[in-house]
Amino acid sequence: MNAHCERVIGTLRRELLDHILITGESHAREVLKTCEDHYNRHRPHQARDQLPLEAQQHPAAVHDLAAHRVLRTRIFGGLVNEYRQAA
């Protein structure tokens, strides 16, 4: 169990805490909640064939990129970007 905890702490430190100055407990909770949401719903994982943890299947392939717009959501002030197809 210790190895799993060290892995999570290392991921948080490398991807988040090395780039953001935490100003208090409420700010830390807000940042960690946002990080948890990104990690579980958007970030690809190699063990799941590049699917996020909460995804059930790959999204449909888009071939005509001119017909579809891509929207970017900036997480942590642009430290992380999430992309999705516009409706």
Image (spheres, rainbow, N blue to C red):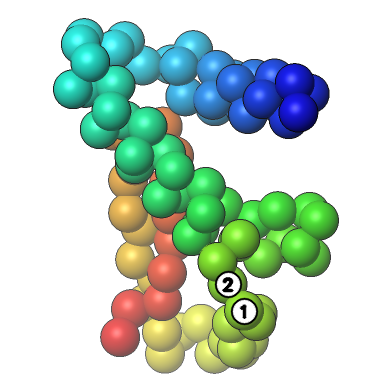
Q: Residues within 10 Å of mark 2 (few under 14, many from 20)?
A: few
Q: Amino acid at mark 1?
A: Gln
Numbered mark located on residue 56 in the image:
1
User: Residue beneath label 2, please?
Assistant: 55
What label sits on residue 5 in the rendered view? none
Q: Indicate the position of residue 35 as horizontal and vertical percent values.
A: 42, 39
Give the left or right position of residue 19, taking residue 58 as reference: left
- Secondary structure of residue under mark 1: loop
Residue found 65% across the figure and 81% down from its top: 57
Q: With respect to residue 78, does 25 lie above or below?
A: above
Q: Can I make out residue 72 in this image?
A: yes
Give SS at disc 2.
loop
Question: Dividing the picture into quarters, in which one does residue 77 lie?
Answer: top left
The residue positioned 41% from the left and 84% from the top of the image is 68
Tag 2 near tag 1, CB within 8 Å: yes
Q: Is residue 12 left or right of residue 67?
A: right
Position of the C terminus, as image quadrant, is bottom left
Give percent across and percent down for residue 71.
34, 66
